[in-house]
Image (tube, grey):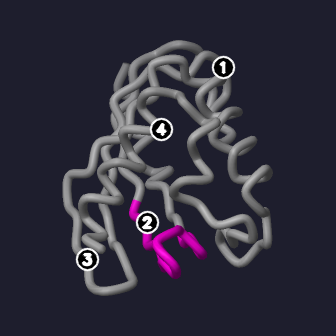
Amino acid sequence: MNLEITYHAYLDCLNSKDLAQLERFVAENVIHNGQSVGLEGYRKMIADDQSDIPDLRFTAELLIADVSNIAARLRFDCHPKRRFRDIDVNGRRVIFHENVFYRFANGKIQEVWSVMDKAEIEKNVAAV
């Protein structure tokens, strides 16, 4: 299995907002930042983000893979509708990054560690 191809297909799934297909990429017992959220909790987390940010698009600027792990720097250029990460964005354009690591097992994401660059969001909002 080529994890880079699988990961890009996962991002395509997110970007097409076809969250019914997440089970192709995400394990039933997935863990996010140390919390057992399960597939449905993970699906809800992404659906909530997509609801709050209608033009949300996941773009991998940097991607490193080995046999069971992916490290990615994701870029977002979007317009959150209201508050986002406790910042009053209210429809303004923000550009920010997320550094995320995934552990795969049996071809699916088993664990995710994610850090969003909140300072970058704050800087974007302050510049407007």
Residue at the spot of label 2: 100
Q: Which mark is residue 65?
A: 3
- Identify the residue shown where x is 67% and y is 27%: 83
The stretch in magenta equals 99-113
| Image depth: mark 3 or mark 1 in front | 3
Q: Are marks 3 and 2 in contact (CB under 8 Å)?
A: no
Q: Position of residue 72 (x, y in %)?
A: 31, 64
Taking the magenta stretch, the answer to whether it contains residue 17 is: no
Q: Secondary structure at mark 2?
A: strand
Residue position marked by numbered label 4 in the rendering: 14
Binning the other alpha carbons within 10 Å of mark 4 as few (below 14), some (14 to 19) or many (20 upward) gives many
For the residues labelled 3 and 2, the Cα–Cα distance comes to: 12 Å
Q: Earlier in the sequence, mark 3 or mark 1?
A: 3
Residue 24 vs 114, above or below: the answer is: above
Numbered disc 4: secondary structure: helix
Mark 3: few/some/many CA within 10 Å (<14, 14-19, 20+): some
Q: Residue at x 41, y 24 (%)?
A: 78
Q: Residues within 10 Å of mark 1 (few under 14, many from 20)?
A: some
Q: Quadrant of residue 48?
A: top right
